[in-house]
Image: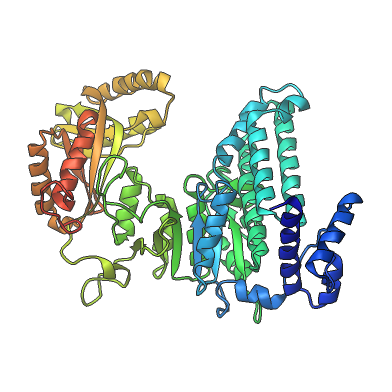
Amino acid sequence: PTTTTRSLVLRAKRFDAFVATTPNNTTAKKWFGFQNLNHREQQRQQRQRRRRRGRIPTVECVVDDARTAAATPGASKKQHTVVMKFGGSSVADAERMKEVANIVLSFPEEMPVLVLSAMGKSTNNLLLCGEESLKCENAEDVSLMKPLLFVKTLHAETMDILNVDKDTRRDVNELLKKLEQVCMGVCLMQEVTPRTRAMLVSFGERMSTRIFASYLRSRGVNAKQYDAFEIGMVTSDDDIENGRVLPESYANLKQSLTLTDGAKPQISVVTGFLGKGENSGAISTLGRGGSDLTATVIGAALALEEVQVWKDVDGVLSADPREIDNTIPMPFLSFEEAQELAYFGAQVLHPQAMRPAMDDGSLRVRVKNSYDIRAPGTVIGHIDYNSSNGKSDDEAERIDDWLLTSIVRKKNVTMLDIVSTRMLGQYGFLAKVFAVLQNNGISVDVVATSEISVSLTLDPAKIWSRDLAQEELEKVQRELEDVGTARVAVSNGHSIVSLIGNLERNNEIMERAFKALKEAKVSVKMVSQGSSKCNISLLVDDAEGQKAVSAIHEEFFGRVGIGKKEHLPGM
């Protein structure tokens, strides 16, 4: 088609859309140059306009209330019914935001609160902005920093593609301007404080939620953006980058997000990860898993039944799919099982994020797949020990004769073997051992003890820089040897393989697991059963870690297509 024809088609589409929402159709036709004109006359006028180099006026369509109400999910609801949380990869760019909007609008029976993270790699680049600002000498250097340019370009392009409204564009541009000013302040002061870092990373969520809410409105949805720190998410001031959510947050959020009587259906879009210091009033962050924590706090505050965390897999899997083929999704996890999985490295919710749901007896968390929205996902919920069949409503999908829920591997683990005859029949020895570890800032993963020895695992690489890890370990070794003339052996390069499941049947689990490891010729160096009663941990060499997980997974979950009988999940 010619340029003229394409232009006419575009104008016709604009006209149809405008007329559909404009009471005075005559006025609309005048705006667009259509008033009882046939096609030939339209072409003539188009040529005249081109010769005059005139422009067709841009008309901003205001969607009427009836159309908005019809397009907004949960039209029959009076209050929000669910929290949906989407992480940075889900809102990484304009196309991913469109997909998230499609997911939200695919559930017309729900009126959700949406909790969003920053777009893609924005958070990392915002932190880099602070570090790079220290190297700058003037405002020009700051404005040309690569991390800053990345953040500016990403959000500008996203706004262009999604065609956000002018108010949102102004707000986001103001935030980008303020971001550059903060970077300039770092350049001048030559200091990045924890409060500054919290302020820097906050721009990510503040911009992503504004852009997404605007895009929903462009699709006829009544959507409103909220900064969590402005609607009552209050945190402690003692650690501004890892703020502890205070109890008053629940009442504040309930008041802010509860719709008034007779209010139109509304999707509320809330910043994840952010809060406000109780006394300082400064923007704070909630630490690792902060957006998940925001979602569960809001779910508990509004007394909802479910919080949905959307990822790119079918819920929580039986093992890491990057290492093991034919993993299967688990229909149900208890909060205790999910905490153990998260601690040992599985990509579930951070243990801290589960606490509000654990404390609320009726709130469950469902992990859903953004690429298969109708898949049930994994429910993380409560166990009802007083029910007639021993199951809660959340556990309804758990099979009766289950053994394992999941297998998770934690790599690059260091083991300390401490042997001392002074342990025999004495008290206080372990207290001295753990005092040494505390003074060196070390958290212990797994412990196994006998009368004269104790073995424990730790991961110093997460505490110290890698250049100092060996030096610091040698220091800890010397201090431990001074405790009761102990002999201390340090060994690196291990994996913890954790079996999360039904430890009421631990004898059967251990028998079958060791049988599988024997057949795979994998040596186990240490065994420990967690006090949570849902975790058995085995220590093996890193080189044999994947083989160990694969052998145990095949024993309990089966392997499809290689001649072995396919097992039911965790049987």
Residue 439 or residue 124, whichever sits in front: 124
Residue at 15% across / 64% down in the picture? 401
Residue 70 lies in quadrant: bottom right
Residue at image point 15% right, 56% down: 567
Residue 474 place in picture, x, y as percent: 32, 19
Q: Is residue 194 visible?
A: no
Horizontal side, residue 424 vs residue 12: left or right: left
Please state the horizontal and vertical placement of residue 558, each as a whole percent of the image: 16, 51
Look at 66% across and 50% down and name the residue there. Answer: 161
Q: Using the image as rendered, state which of residue 554 and residue 334 is in the foreground.
A: 554
Q: Nearer the viewer, residue 343 or 316?
A: 316
Looking at the picture, does residue 105 appear above or below residue 197? below
Horizontal placement of 432 versus 120: left or right?
left
Residue 252 lies left or right of residue 558; in this view the side is: right
Looking at the image, how many numbered discs can be counted on the residues?
0
Q: Position of residue 118 (x, y in %)?
A: 57, 47
Q: Residue furthest front?
A: 40
What is the quadrant of the C terminus in the image? bottom left
Q: How is the image coloured?
A: rainbow
Q: Work out whether residue 76 can be spotted.
A: yes
Quarter assignment of residue 144: top right
- The one nearer the camera, 553 or 61, is 61
Q: Position of residue 62 (x, y in %)?
A: 76, 68
